[in-house]
Image (cartoon, rainbow, N blue to C red):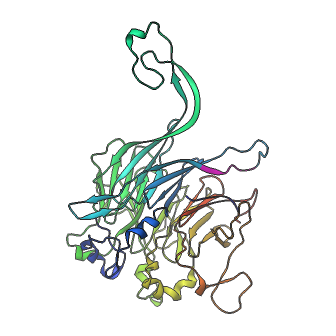
Amino acid sequence: MCNTAVANGGSALHPKMRGIARAAAMQASPHCPANVPQPSSEEVTSGADIISTVEFNHTGELLATGDKGGRVVIFQREPESKNEPYSQGEYNVYSTFQSHEPEFDYLKSLEIEEKINKIKWLPQQNAAHSLLSTNDKTIKLWKITERDKRPEGYNLKDEEGKLKDLSTVTSLQVPVLKPMDLMVEVTPRRIFANGHTYHVNSISVNSDCETYMSADDLRINLWHLAITDRSFNIVDIKPANMEDLTEVITASEFHPHHCNLFVYSSSKGSLRLCDMRASALCDKHSKLYEEPEDPSNRSFFSEIISSVSDVKFSHSGRYMLTRDYLTVKVWDLNMETKPVETYQVHDYLRSKLCSLYENDCIFDKFECAWNGSDSVIMTGAYNNFFRMFDRNTKRDVTLEASRESSKPRAILKPRRVCVGGKRRKDDISVDSLDFTKKILHTAWHPTENIIAIAATNNLYIFQDKVNSEMH
């Protein structure tokens, strides 16, 4: 795989499960554990360009990233060069806009971050593109259009747009369109607010192209894209007494082909497939996917590391891909008892769970992605490593996204983490991994072997060599 472009691009329920209900009262500092000081304003500002989500559109020609500063950057794939007809076009910045601003909830004395949690593209209906972006509370629908011509020769206005003196207008003229430099205009079309008490963790556009859903820690809402002032609550797991709370919703997604089906994952490691035809409120799931725990592996950290951080339907709609802290799993929709495939992402961290708990890394939420043919899956790890697993050959590879090892057009070398014993030349010791460098957000081109990797405030775009295998 070679590197083609590098570009810089209410209250939350706290993840520590030993006292999950306690978090409902932590409204003054929703993101920070007890006894941990809040970051200073300088620290917050310096992290504004950290990428928080990455998403290709349905054709793969556009790629959007959101960051902690509330900005959305859209990259467009350049057309293939005439001189090199077989070379793939690179992605260059197409448009940048401020999607969300920091807000303050005066009723709850809560700061609402501008950080973009998720971006989802809508299927293209005309020449314009549309996307949804959300922070913790508010979802916005944006329209992206191009303009490369401007009208000139108005009858009642001059070239600056000011009204002419009507007494000077002695003849009529037909306005004409004159070429101009391409201008990309991004305009807000809808603002969907006041739908969530807790922090929005996922949004998903339905295959009917008319509705979408948004999920927070305890509820999932169904919205119509044309209606902003009301939504329908389709899942509500909030108990009457918050002290009885045992799990939270971590991610949700609509089925790619059946508009009535959706899945949501929980902090207990389970998946619930729901059918909206069964009832208006989908509290009773149609199928429950859960893997029984091995009692011999039971530990203090078992419940934390089993929490599902991401769930994705395969393009075919037959399988679901989930990511927990140590593994990625492939589930068959027709088999609820256990996953059909389990891949170890970084099993060498099993002995480090205590220190990872102390520095809060154990609560990192890694995402996962399918390739276009559902044959390869990808997810991130630490030290700017990301992992790819070929479902057919059962091969796997560890690659690194970093400026040092990823020069344009360079071939990425597989990396290997050494746990103990003899070390080969390029091996890296598990004790020297950098846990501040983490690949949480990844995306795969819908049809081609092109991937986007967000590494802190850098976006890496890699593509396969022509006719190559997984790497």
Towards the viewer: 113 or 295: 113
Image quarter of the N terminus? bottom right
Say if 334 sits above or below 153 in the image: below
Q: Main secondary structure of the magenta part?
A: loop
Residue 71 pos. (x, y %): 46, 54
Q: Is residue 338 above or below residue 183?
A: below
x, y (%) of residue 155? 45, 15
Count of numbered badges drawn on the protein: 0
Picture coordinates of residue 416, whole percent (x, y): 67, 79
Tell me the quadrant of the picture where the C terminus can be found.
bottom right
Q: Residue at x 41, y 56 (%)?
A: 203
The residue furthest top is 170
Visible residue check, residue 255: no
Q: Is residue 252 above or below residue 162?
A: below
Residue 398 spot, x, y in % from top left: 65, 73
Give me the residue at 53% from left, 78% from top: 435
- Which residue is most to the right? 83
Question: Does 440 sit left or right of 412 as displayed?
Answer: left
Q: Is residue 16 visible?
A: yes
- Nearest the camera: 464 or 210? 464
Does residue 206 appear left or right of residue 374 in this picture? Answer: left
* Residue 8 inside the magenta-drawn segment: no
Which quarter of the figure has residue 244?
Answer: bottom left
Magenta residues span 87-92
